[in-house]
Amino acid sequence: MVTSRLFAEHNRESIKEIAANGGLAIIPIGAIEQHGPHLPVWTDTLNVETITRAASVLVDNSIPILVTPTLPFGSSDHHLPFGGTMSLDTKVLLDVLMNLGRSLHKSGFRKIMYINGHGGNHEIFQLAARDLALQQDIHVAAASWWSVAWSRIKETAAFDFGRVPGHAGAFEYAIVKAIAPHLVGSELIPSLWPDKDSPTKRDSWISPTRVELAGSWIKMNGYSDNPGAIPDDLGKELLKLSIDGVREAIESFYYSATAEEKEIGKK
């Protein structure tokens, strides 16, 4: 019997059995896009895949979950001018996420969770979660890995070094270095930092008003702040805290969705 929590390592029968037993399917979403001269283009995919898989191992053993292969492409049109970027149009990405969710529902899953690793996907995967729940009458959750770890990250010194999560700055550099140090280009870290009005400086996913200024992504030159600022030990701590935040989010969604199913069953 396969005990792995990775969807791809199971066969169709074990997948259907897990789904029938109230299983939760998790879809990690990344991106392939430029991250300056110092980080790999699959940074967002690497981070969300590593964090989600590590979190799934820590989830309570009584919870049946499967983590699907990571969707490596996202909405990254704003990075196309820099090169090294493969992007999906907004509508295409939404359709892909909806189709993946519907496919899992056809396998019997009534609990699906999108875990995101790229800021440009933010509104799109949330729309997919809402529409999928409405159309298929199932439970769907959607979160970015740093958002569910936010309270933990705030307790560290991460904000003293740059934007969180930023883009190809200190925070992302520290996470990638903690995961795969051989992929970071320490000798390629830029010596000049972006303009103070770059998009990642404006906390657009937190502010009640979203502002997009034409040409602002070009000004930032592909990164948000000093990439090499965070000490290595803090990077490792941030990775650990992020994994635990995702673990907690998975468990919380599973328990709340299961409780709702039981409540509906009583009616």
Image (spheres, grey):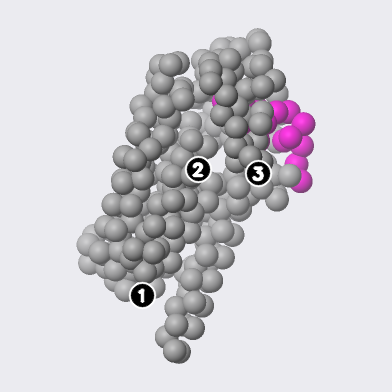
* Marks 3 and 1, how far apart at CA: 40 Å
Q: Amino acid at mark 2?
A: His
Q: Which residue is mark 2?
A: 122
Q: What secondary structure predominates along the stretch shown in magenta?
A: loop
Q: Is residue 168 magenta?
A: yes
Q: Nearer the viewer, mark 2 or mark 1?
A: 2
> Label 2: few (<14), some or many (≥20) within 10 Å?
some
Quarter of image, res 108: bottom left
Horizontal and vertical percent position of residue 31? 42, 34
Q: Nearer the viewer, mark 3 or mark 1?
A: 3
At horizontal 49% and vertical 83% (from top left) the residue drawn is: 263
Q: Which residues are magenta?
A: 155-171
Q: Is residue 100 magenta?
A: no
Q: Amino acid at mark 1?
A: Asn
Q: Residue furthest left?
A: 12
Q: Which residue is mark 3?
A: 208
Left or right of residue 226, residue 61 in this image: left
